[in-house]
Image: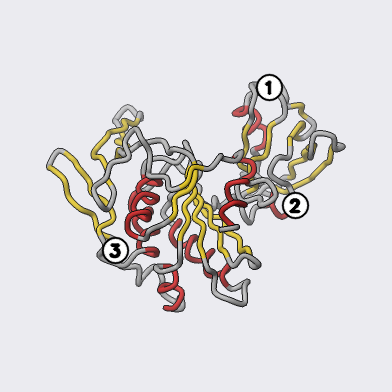
């Protein structure tokens, strides 16, 4: 149990920095912000602890209260928060609407079983905040290292027509195309106009050197099939499919079972996806924060 934080640290010691409060979590509700530095947890100085040990200090039973002393900004005074621990549901999609620019922004941090539904719900909710239909969707895959291939295909089913060749998989039996499934069940209860809009709205896809594997597949295929504008730095260049196998000893073995290529059978191995415009990456602490995220700010102007 915890309060719902993505955490990081740029040095072996020092305060632990908040990368992002998880959407809907106690941390977000109580006002913690990206870039806040945590100095103490329940009166314990964590500056000499490893990040893993600091995370362990944060854990506790649901209903108990975590007391934090944080610093916001280099010259700001410290602030104190008392936040109840809860069971946290990890959200893999975060979205916001830029009404003035008529743009919906959606960041997918990883691909999980429910990512496609989260993405669809987020788009529907953010679209409703504007009086006019959005002119563009910005899909942020920076830092996304992939996840479940079926989840990636499910997101793809919302953005391209069913039956479209989405990828090719090569295993020991040969190469075979994989087509986009029908999203009718996933989009059940959603206005059909929304589904049509998602498959036709102009797309920009943001990537960086930590965009890998299935996230690269999605970016490259959208570039090919939807003429998406790909923006950022060279992606990681990982094209393998892996599975975990449980062993009798209790250990797990990770097996590489296949390799991926895009809809047009193009490989991004070791070179990354095709980039239409190179753009300097922002700090992960700043993704989606308009005042600081240079790549997003530039794309909103287009």
Residue 240 appears at what percent x and percent y? Answer: 30, 38
Describe the element under mark 3 as helix, strand or loop.
loop
Residue density around tag 2, few if under 14, some if 14–19, many if 20 or more, within 10 Å: some
Q: Which residue is mark 3?
A: 181
Q: Which residue is mark 2?
A: 30
Disc nearest the viewer among 2 and 1: 1
Of the image marks 2 and 1, the number of the one nearer the N terminus: 1
Q: CA distance from mark 3 to mark 1?
A: 47 Å
The picture quadrant where one finds residue 81 is top right
| x 44%, y 57%: residue | 114
Residue density around tag 3, few if under 14, some if 14–19, many if 20 or more, within 10 Å: many
Q: CA distance from mark 2 to mark 1?
A: 26 Å
Residue density around tag 1, few if under 14, some if 14–19, many if 20 or more, within 10 Å: few
Q: Hey, which residue is sitting farthest right in the picture?
A: 77
Residue 169, label in figure: none
Residue 13, label in figure: 1
Whether label 3 touches label 1, CB < 8 Å:
no
Q: CA distance from mark 2 to mark 3?
A: 40 Å
| x 76%, y 28%: residue | 44
The C terminus lies in quadrant: bottom right
Residue 168 appears at what percent x and percent y? Answer: 23, 49
The front one of 295 and 152 is 295
119 vs 82: above or below: below
């Amino acid at each position: 149990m915890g309060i719902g934080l993505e955490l990081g640290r740029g040095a072996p010691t020092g305060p632990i920095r908040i990368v992002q409060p998880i959407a809907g979590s106690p941390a977000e509700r109580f006002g913690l912000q990206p870039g806040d530095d945590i100095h103490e947890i329940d009166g314990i100085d964590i500056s000499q602890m490893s990040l893993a040990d600091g995370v362990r200090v944060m854990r506790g039973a649901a209903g108990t209260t975590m007391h934090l002393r944080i610093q916001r900004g280099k010259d700001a005074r410290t602030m104190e928060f008392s936040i109840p621990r809860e069971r946290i549901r990890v959200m893999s999609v975060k979205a916001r609407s830029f009404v003035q620019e008529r743009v919906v922004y959606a960041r997918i941090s990883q691909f999980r079983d429910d990512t496609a539904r989260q993405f669809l719900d987020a788009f529907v909710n953010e679209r409703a905040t504007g009086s006019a239909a959005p002119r563009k969707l910005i899909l942020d895959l920076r830092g996304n290292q992939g996840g479940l291939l079926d989840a990636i295909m499910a997101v793809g089913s919302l953005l391209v027509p069913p039956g479209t060749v989405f990828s090719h998989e090569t295993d020991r039996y040969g190469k075979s195309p994989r087509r986009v499934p029908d999203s009718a069940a996933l989009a059940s209860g959603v206005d059909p106009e929304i589904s049509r809009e998602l498959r036709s709205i102009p797309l920009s896809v943001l990537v960086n050197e930590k965009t890998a594997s299935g996230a690269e597949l999605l970016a490259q295929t959208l570039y090919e099939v939807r003429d998406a504008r790909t923006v950022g730095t060279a992606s990681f260049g990982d094209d393998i499919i892996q599975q975990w196998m449980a062993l009798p000893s209790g250990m797990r073995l990770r097996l590489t079972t296949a390799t991926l290529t895009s809809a047009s059978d193009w490989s991004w191995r070791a070179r990354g996806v095709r980039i239409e415009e190179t753009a300097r990456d922002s700090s992960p602490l700043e993704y989606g924060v308009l005042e600081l995220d240079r790549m997003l700010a530039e794309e909103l102007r287009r």
